[in-house]
Image: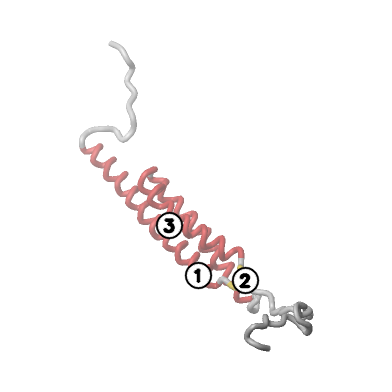
Amino acid sequence: MTANQPPQDGPLQGEPLPLQPQPRGPPFEGPPPPATNPLALASMIVGIAAIVILPVSGCCCSFLGGVLPVILGGVAAVLGHVALKQVRDSGGTRVSRNMAIAGLAMGYAGIALGLIVTGAWAAFLVYTIQRGQQQGASPFFQFRPLGP
């Protein structure tokens, strides 16, 4: 081939090279990925809810507002313990041990913080009633008839 000639595309000048199929092996089929334990995920979600709802329900609503994080924390702890047992007994087919542990930790934190808030509300209520009694007021509403 000289410098003035165009390059050849195929066996004859100007013909494209024929496409040849490439040999393929079987597709890779490894083991399926381990499944996430749904109870571990539920434990983590409910544990997060127990912590997040604490400022809203415990500090703003009332004395009973601190009870909701305790209930949610208890549910998260139970779900976390059951999920840990299922992950341990699955033989590696289920993962998410860390999710279950996170749900347990947040569940127990929700229980503890909920009890603290409930105790603080109870102490405030007792203090308010005692102070009112010292000043001669009744802890309950007294309805007076309207008029002379």
Query: Left or right of 147: which side holds 115?
Result: right
Q: CA distance from mark 1 to mark 2?
A: 13 Å
Q: Which disc, if any, is residue 51?
A: 3
Which class describes the residues within 10 Å of circle 3: few (<14), some (14-19), or many (20+)? many
Q: CA distance from mark 3 to mark 1?
A: 15 Å
Residue 46 in picture, x, y percent from top left: 51, 57
Q: Split into 4 quadrants, where in the image is the N terminus? A: bottom right
Identity of the amino acid at label 3?
A: Ile
Residue at left offset 29%, top offset 40%? 129
Identity of the amino acid at label 2?
A: Gln
Q: Which disc, if any, is residue 44?
A: none
Q: Are marks 1 and 2 in contact (CB under 8 Å)?
A: no
Residue 88 in picture, x, y percent from top left: 60, 76
Q: Which residue is mark 1?
A: 101
Q: Residue furthest front?
A: 4
Which class describes the residues within 10 Å of circle 2: few (<14), some (14-19), or many (20+)? some
Q: Which residue is mark 2?
A: 86
Q: Of the residues under marks 3 and 1, which one precedes in the sequence?
A: 3
Scheme of image coloration = secondary structure
Element class at badge 1: helix
Element class at badge 2: helix
Element class at badge 3: helix
